[in-house]
Amino acid sequence: MTRTSLDKSRIRFLLLEGIHPSAVELLHAQGYTQVEALSGALPEEELKAKIADVHFLGIRSRTQLTASVFEAANKLVAVGAFCIGTNQIDLLAASAHGVAVFNAPYSNTRSVAELVLGESILLLRGVPGKSAAAHRGQWLKTADNAFEIRGKVLGIVGYGSIGAQLSVLAEALGMQVLFHDVVTKLPLGNARQVRDLEELLSASDIVSLHVPELPSTQWMIGARQIAAMKPGAILINASRGTVVEIDALAAALKEGRLLGAAVDVFPVEPRTNKDEFVSPLRGLDNVILTPHIGGSTMEAQANIGLEVAQKLVKYSDNGTTTTSVNFPEAALPAHPGQHRLLHVHRNVPGVMSEINKVFAEAGTNICAQYLQTRGDLGYVVTDIEAASSERALEKLAQVPGTIRSRVLF
Ligand SMILES: NC(=O)C1=CN([C@@H]2O[C@H](COP(=O)(O)OP(=O)(O)OC[C@H]3O[C@@H](n4cnc5c(N)ncnc54)[C@H](O)[C@@H]3O)[C@@H](O)[C@H]2O)C=CC1
Ligand SMILES: O=C(O)CCC(=O)C(=O)O
């Protein structure tokens, strides 16, 4: 697939799921005027119809980018996930179509950690139940089952950016922190990495989950793991809905085995704010239910809007792919006066020599060349004199193994 350089005014951006206006402002300021921003996610067929004309797509956690969506996205150059998780994107399909994917790996970390800490305090005091009762006219003034957070044991599953941030905040409130991670991690403060998940579950007053959605994390907290938790403990899930078996959690809460829970993410989430939220946890007073808003603060969203839009602009303007989640990473300098050829190919032996044969046979003088590979993908960027770029691009597209090529003026 070959693309010649488009005038910025012809490059189309589609931003879904209420991405913060800071993204649109940045794109406009960088000369990209064709930006359509919608508030919700689109069903697959609608998305496929709409995406056919789109060069850059912005999504959050709701939009499912399947292989079939990528098939329909002929013009798509890059996807911006305006969030941390990229499990909603078929990254192999994106790579196979030469589509670069970017995200914002840290911008909402603090927001999630703060929410979890706030929920921990409220649940230890039984506030959700007492508040719900007060709304019904009941006055539940009692200290029964109400506890301070100081001295309690917080068990963090997944000690990455969010888990580690939570650990620091929790210690500041006097909690003891244990964590379980598949990787050996530097414990912050007095936190301690435990041997396995079972040890963490049996020792913690509050268990908070911060793992990515992976085959290995799917349903990692089920009936057996909940039974291994301390009686009267609290479970918090602000990671992904596939990490906890929701029926097992509902059963434990109804039986009173757990003191409470806070759940922000669900196996099935409404696509828009107008769709009904259905869950076996509805109606349980000792459960805080939130609509996947762990990262939804004005601060985080404004920063994410800028960060991801900036990454898309850099890739569009000069081919830089730094921090891409699926592409070889290349930080490229400006290319004044030269044309820049971007070539995405299958990383198999011989492609580079074929590419350079194209330039040699055409007598093209190469001003600069950069190559990076990542797994099955190769990304080579060649700066050449402007006069020969059109012919070179045509020839490059015929190199066996080519996935996509593009020229930047
Ligand atoms: N509720 C919300 O709005 C938000 C949810 N998230 C979710 O939180 C997840 C975590 O975010 P970050 O901390 O930034 O990710 P991260 O990648 O920095 O940390 C994840 C940690 O989990 C560990 N891990 C992976 N598999 C594991 C397993 N089977 N058992 C134990 N540990 C395991 C990793 O080694 C890593 O240390 C994201 O992937 C995303 O799904 C992120 C932001 C907002
Ligand atoms: O804010 C969102 O839409 C998604 C937040 C999230 O889950 C993430 O950043 O991974």
Image (cartoon, rainbow, N blue to C red):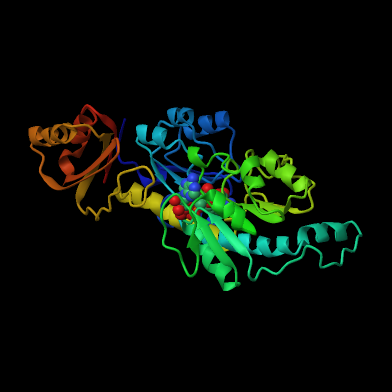
Residue 240 in the image: state x and y as whole percent: 57, 45
Left or right position of 292 against 134:
left
Residue 107 in the image: state x and y as whole percent: 49, 59
Left or right position of 156 against 334:
right
Residue drawn at point x = 69 percent, y = 40 percent? 248
Left or right position of 51 against 320:
right
Residue drawn at point x = 49 percent, y = 62 percent? 192
Query: As rendered, which of 252 and 338 lies closer to the eye?
Result: 252
Residue drawn at point x = 66 percent, y = 46 percent? 227
Residue 225 in the image: state x and y as whole percent: 61, 45
User: How many numbered dots are placed on residues in this image?
Assistant: 0
Residue drawn at point x = 77 percent, y = 58 percent? 128
Query: As rendered, which of 281 and 297 lies closer to the eye?
Result: 281
Residue 5 in the image: state x and y as whole percent: 30, 41
Query: As rendered, which of 357 and 228 lies closer to the eye?
Result: 228
Residue 84 shows in this picture: no
Task: Tell me: residue 27, above or below residue 327.
Answer: below
Residue 65 shows in this picture: yes
Q: In the picture, which quadrant includes the N terminus?
A: top left
Q: Residue furthest right?
A: 137
Query: As rendered, which of 147 and 332 lies closer to the eye?
Result: 147
